[in-house]
Amino acid sequence: MSWELAAAIAEIISAVAVVISLVYLAVQIKSNTTQLKFNEGHAIADSADRGFEPIYSEPAMSIWTKGHRDIGQLTDDERTIFDALMIRNIQNFQNMILARRESLIDEEVFHRTLVGFYTPLINSPGGAEWFEDRKDYFIDEVSEILSKDG
């Protein structure tokens, strides 16, 4: 066997090895992407849970409900708590918008889950009044996405 033939065989083997490596990398990237999307869903759910966690107990639940019906009926102390709960949740939604800008959140997940989840917060009578007074605290997209007309 000549050196030229051996070199040609080595080149063919190298080319096949490169193709196999590229196929392997493609499979690994696809698997990693799937895992990242799965983790993304859990991160979104965890973030929403953390935003609402303080609301699940009394007196926060009563204040939350009362504030969404009519923010004007809250005492000063209740208003402070309602403000904190709303800021926490709308800030959470704003963070989701920023994550979506970076393609960290799937568009369908964003619209079907998050927008539907957060929209009632600023479309209740008390939520709308609260948000109108504070919408300048948040990026414009929060208002555009969550408004009744948005």
Image: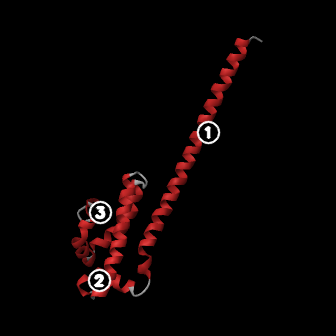
| Mark 1: few/some/many CA within 10 Å (<14, 14-19, 20+) | few
Q: Amino acid at mark 1?
A: Tyr
> Of discs 2 and 1, which sits in the foreground?
2
Badge 2 or badge 1: first in the primary sequence: 1
- The local secondary structure at tag 3 comes to helix
| Mark 2: few/some/many CA within 10 Å (<14, 14-19, 20+) | some
The Cα atoms of the two marked residues, 2 and 1, are separated by: 57 Å
The Cα atoms of the two marked residues, 3 and 1, are separated by: 42 Å
Q: Amino acid at mark 2?
A: Arg
User: Circle 1 is placed at which residue position?
Assistant: 24
Place of residue 16 in the rendered image (x, y in percent of width and height, measured from the top left)? 65, 27
Residue 142: mark: 3
Place of residue 89 in the rendered image (x, y in percent of width and height, measured from the top left)? 36, 71
Residue 35: mark: none
Place of residue 96 in the rendered image (x, y in percent of width and height, measured from the top left)? 38, 61
User: Circle 2 is placed at which residue position?
Assistant: 79
Place of residue 46 in the rendered image (x, y in percent of width and height, measured from the top left)? 48, 67
Badge 3 or badge 1: first in the primary sequence: 1
Q: Quadrant of the C terminus?
A: bottom left
Looking at the image, do the residues carrying marks 2 and 1 touch, with CB atoms under 8 Å apart?
no
Q: In the displayed structure, does residue 126 sit left or right of residue 112?
A: left
